[in-house]
Amino acid sequence: MKVIFFGPSEKAIASGGDKEFEAGGVKNLRDAGINVLACSRVAENNGIKDLLLQKSIPMEPVGPVIANYIKQGYAVMTF
């Protein structure tokens, strides 16, 4: 499983405090060994890149990442 935060989910992580960060499941995902990633372009456009970096959320442009995951056979789920 791979988890990519994009748009509203990035904003929610960036704007929440530590309690919301943990309650939002990011800590749980990491504890389960699931890699998380956020879109660097969306974060930059929304002015939240530094806030995500403070929470140690790795970022990169996710278009090529998603395309690569699809080629590897991953199914894309959005909600």
Image (cartoon, rainbow, N blue to C red):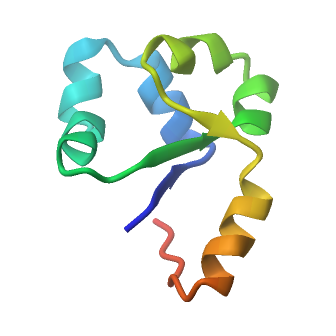
Q: Is residue 79 left or right of residue 66?
A: left
Whether 4 is drawn above or below 9: the answer is below
Image spot of residue 44 (x, y percent): 78, 24
| Placement of 32 over or under 48, stated as above or below | below
The reply, left or right, for residue 59 in relation to residue 27 is right
| Residue 67, above or below 3 | below
Q: Is residue 26 visible?
A: yes
Q: Residue at x 71, y 53 (%)?
A: 62
The image quadrant where one finds the N terminus is bottom left
Residue at 21 percent of width and 28 percent of height: 22
x, y (%) of residue 32?
A: 18, 51
**Residue shown at the point (55%, 17%) measured from the top left:** 53
Number of marks drawn: 0
Using the image as rendered, state which of residue 79 and residue 22 is in the foreground: 22
38 is higher (above) or lower (below) than 18 = below
Q: Is residue 62 left or right of residue 50?
A: right
Relative image position of residue 66 (x, y in whole percent): 67, 67
The reply to whether residue 48 is visible in this rendering is: no
Q: Position of residue 51 (x, y in %)?
A: 55, 13
- Using residue 3 as the reference point, say whether residue 67 is left or right of it: right
Closest to the observer, 49 or 7: 49
Q: Quadrant of residue 46?
A: top right
Residue placed at 26% from the left, 47% from the top?
29
